[in-house]
Image (cartoon, rainbow, N blue to C red):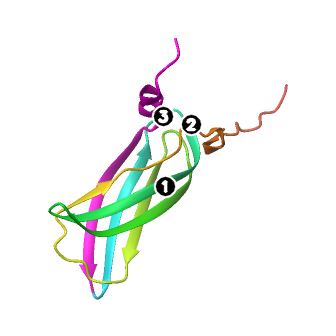
Amino acid sequence: MVPSDARIVAERKTFRVDDFAFSSESGVSRAAFTVANTGVYNFWSVRVPVVLLSGSEVIAANIVTLDHLDSGEKKQVQTDWYQTISGTTSYVIEPEVDVFDDSAYRTKKAPLQKLR
């Protein structure tokens, strides 16, 4: 049986976003959070769009790229806007990777062991 595209995406795009914090002062606004790869696949690069909302209106957006996000790894992320942003009521952060592109995946190199 061939798995459906939706199943493949669900099995491979297994990221979790935690610890979101937002600050805005002195003309600089910052979003900070963690991204965890909770799946079994290692990726060369993961795009992380960050969207700030005031109600349902987008008030700021940025994209962060994470290099080498391996299975079980958790990375601290931050992105800055060089302006004061006020009225933020919520955010949308959904890490992206093209799970159908073979070049997106990387293999971890096992440590060398002495032969006996």
Q: What stretch is highlighted in magenta?
A: 1-25
Please rate how many residues cluster around mark 2, counting C-alpha atoms within 10 Å: few if below 14, some from 14 to 19, many from 20.
few
Label 2: element kind: loop
Q: Distance between the residues labelled 2 and 1?
A: 15 Å
Where 81 sits versus 115, above or below? below
Whole-percent x, y for residue 104 in the image: 61, 44
Q: Disc 1 marks which residue?
A: 47
Amino acid of disc 1: Arg
Identify the mark at residue 100; answer none if there is no mark. Answer: 2
Asked which quadrant contains residue 83, the reply is bottom left
Split into 4 quadrants, where in the image is the C terminus?
Answer: top right
Label 3: element kind: helix
Extreme residue in the bottom direction: 26
Mark 2 or mark 1, which has the lower sequence index? 1
Amino acid of disc 3: Arg
Residue at 42% across, 61% down: 77
Label 1: element kind: strand
Q: In this view, does 22 lie to the left or right of 82?
A: left
Q: How far apart are marks 3 and 2 (CA)?
A: 10 Å
